[in-house]
Amino acid sequence: MTSSNPIVDALDAAGYRLTGPRRAVADLIAGYDGHFTAAELEAAAREHRVGVSRATLFRALELLTELHVVERLDLPGGEHAYVPCVRAHHHHLVCSRCGRVAEVEDCGLAEIVAEIARRSGYRIESHRLELFGLCRHCQAKAAPGA
Amino acid sequence: MTSSNPIVDALDAAGYRLTGPRRAVADLIAGYDGHFTAAELEAAAREHRVGVSRATLFRALELLTELHVVERLDLPGGEHAYVPCVRAHHHHLVCSRCGRVAEVEDCGLAEIVAEIARRSGYRIESHRLELFGLCRHCQAKAAPGA
DNA sequence: ATTTTTGCAAACCTTTTGCATGGAA
DNA sequence: TTCCATGCAAAAGGTTTGCAAAAAT
């Protein structure tokens, strides 16, 4: 059976129990365009008056990260954030003003990675590209005349 | 005047006082090929019997990060680590077994970043590429017959 | 009925801060 | 002598854990 929330579906498909707290967390996450921290998620839960304890929240995030329906992101300042995302390999383009996250596919990066492997002699197992900047919307706000 | 430690020189050049603890931290860091965490650095200080309090250690790391003589790195597991490094823009190739870090220059990445900017409409301000894999040395150890 | 999940609260780990003392310039 | 840097110890986050109670299957 399929719910209207892909995160719930992923939990279901992986054989986890569909509990109230998990559904609540899934719904909250589905509402995000951009990244969110554990603390923000907790605040959102409180605001929406859904009962999710901090421990459960962290456990849910860990679980969803394993299932690759959210991904952990390291912000430039060092904070940990999460983004809802698709399973395929991709990278994140983060708006440093509003936090909106766009997913970008590989677009030529694989070749560069291969080249780096060749030059360095390392056997590269994974890579992560994080891009930070201003989304269109925030560019407009930041420089109204431009 | 120039010391035998470039980290000390950087502190000096920037007008900071060359104190005992700062020299000690600089020497410890200079001994690393790869990344190290604050906790590891603290342990190393204790081991070498140099007195550096935790607060001072963190303050030194912050300072050196600002001076770009070390850079903060986010390991796949989410821990924060530091690497001694050159000032120019570059990326890190981290051995996931021994922690050794190689610096890699841009090698074509700039074009890709420009392409991503074009497609997404974001004004990209910074980017970070982190690569993880096995260095030559660890490849040999991991697969002795290969 | 069984097994998983939750909540609570405490523990833990990492990093930061205030403030008086000590050391570099 | 003057200001910067240190150490201490406490505080502040952020995240994890043990365990008994509650909920899902």
Image: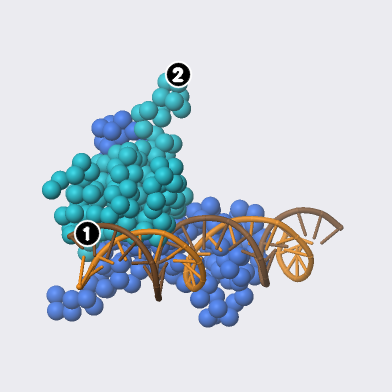
Chain colours: A cyan, B blue, C orange, D brown
Residue that numbered label 1 is attached to: A16
Label 1 or label 2, whichever lies nearer to me, is 1
Q: Amino acid at mark 2?
A: Gly
Mark 1 falls within which chain? A
When asked about the image quadrant of residue B52, the answer is bottom right
Going 40% across and 60% down the picture, which residue do you hit?
Answer: A55
Task: Determine whether A89 is above or below B94 in the image.
Answer: above
Report whether residue A92 is seen. no
User: Residue B95, image x and y in percent?
Assistant: 31, 66
Mark 1 vs mark 2: which is more N-terminal? 1
When asked about the image quadrant of residue A58, the answer is bottom left
In which quadrant will I find the N terminus of chain B? bottom right
Element under disc 2: loop
Mark 2 falls within which chain? A
Work out whether residue A123 or residue A30 is closer to the camera in this orientation and state it. Answer: A30
Viewed as shown, does residue B130 lie left or right of B62? left
Residue that numbered label 2 is attached to: A145
Task: Determine whether B66 is above or below B76 in the image.
Answer: above
Going 24% across and 54% down the picture, which residue do you hit?
Answer: A18
